[in-house]
Image (tube, grey):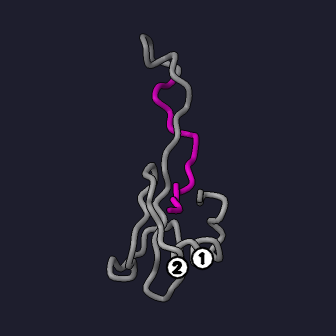
Amino acid sequence: MATFSPPTDNFVFWADARTTGILAHLRNGPRGRNVFKLSNGGYTENQPANVGEAVKTYHGGHIHQLTSAEVAELTQAGYGAYITA
């Protein structure tokens, strides 16, 4: 079954220049981006102003199992690189 891991950004700062101790040694970490399927069939990473517009949410930082229809839709929307077979 195919899976989808939404894109991530590697800019979560665990510490700043003033931090000492163990946190000062951590590198920037990943932050998952949510992908929303909209009621009009489109996809966005921006949270819709109207909650009812989002018919499905792929939460960042999680792995989602997909149906073949979802694979086709996400690939067409430009998320094919984040899908594994």
Give percent across and percent down for residue 79: 62, 65
Give the numbered dot on residue 31.
none
Kindly identify the amino acid type of the residue bearing the numbered disc 1: Ala
- Is 29 within the magenta? no
Is residue 14 magenta-colored? yes
Which disc, if any, is residue 72? 1
How many numbered discs, if any?
2
Rate crowding at label 1 as few (under 14), some (14 to 19) or many (20 or more) other CA atoms within 10 Å.
few
Q: Residue furthest left?
A: 52
Residue 65 vertical position relative to residue 12 in the rendered view, above or below: below
Residue 60 coordinates in the image, percent (x, y) = 45, 54
Amino acid type, residue under disc 2 in the picture: Ala
Structural crowding at the residue carrying mark 2, measured as other residues with C-alpha within 10 Å and reported as few (<14), some (14–19) or many (≥20): few
Q: Does residue 77 lie above or below 10 as drawn? A: below
At x 38%, y 79%, the residue is: 55
Give the secondary structure at mark 1: helix
Read off the magenta span: 1-16
Do tag 1 and tag 2 residues touch (Cβ < 8 Å)? yes
- In the visual, does 81 lie left or right of 39? right
- Residue closest to the eye, 30 or 80: 80
The residue closer to the viewer here, 41 or 28, is 41
Q: Position of residue 15 (x, y in %)?
A: 47, 25
Give the quadrant of the C terminus: bottom right
Residue under the point 52% across and 55% down? 5
Q: Residue at x 51, y 85 (%)?
A: 41
Image height check: is 78 above or below 28? below
- Residue ID for mark 2: 69
Using the numbered discs, state the Cα–Cα distance from disc 1 to disc 2 in whole angstroms: 5 Å
Location of residue 21 by image quarter? top left
* Residue appearing at x 46%, y 80% in the figure: 38
